[in-house]
Image (cartoon, helix red, strand yellow):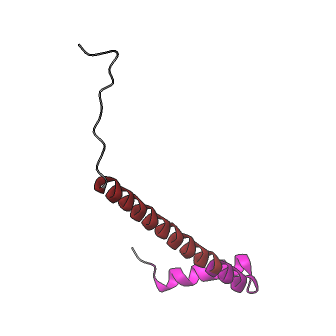
Amino acid sequence: MSLGTSEILLIAVVVLLLFGAKRIPELARAFGRASSEYKKAKEAIANEGKDLVAEAEKAAASSSAAPEAPATKKSDGPSV
């Protein structure tokens, strides 16, 4: 199910009638800016995710490298 030439032409005519010839370039610029902002935000989120994963791996590596102190049993009184 793809768009043929006649369907694309019909959509173009409807857009031209709805928005007018002067508004179409403005809409295209706005769409381009929005697309650019979306890409920037998507990259920022991906980078933040990578940073969080790296930080978590670093924390896990440092906690597994440090030996834990042996647990001491707390007594209630003198042992007999």
User: On the rendered structure, is 55 left or right of 73?
Assistant: right
Above or below 53: residue 10:
below
Above or below 42: residue 72:
above
Q: Is residue 20 magenta?
A: yes
User: On the rendered structure, is 63 left or right of 27?
Assistant: left
Above or below 7: residue 66:
above
Residue occupying image coordinates x 45% and y 66% = 51
Q: Is residue 44 magenta?
A: no
Range of residues picked out in magenta: 3-32
Farthest residue, direction left: 80
- Residue 78 on image: x %, y %: 31, 15
Residue occupying image coordinates x 34% and y 16% = 76
Looking at this view, is 45 or 38 the one in front?
A: 45
Type of secondary structure dominating the magenta stretch: helix
Residue occupying image coordinates x 53% and y 82% = 8
- Residue 42 on image: x %, y %: 52, 70
Q: In which quarter of the image is residue 69?
A: top left
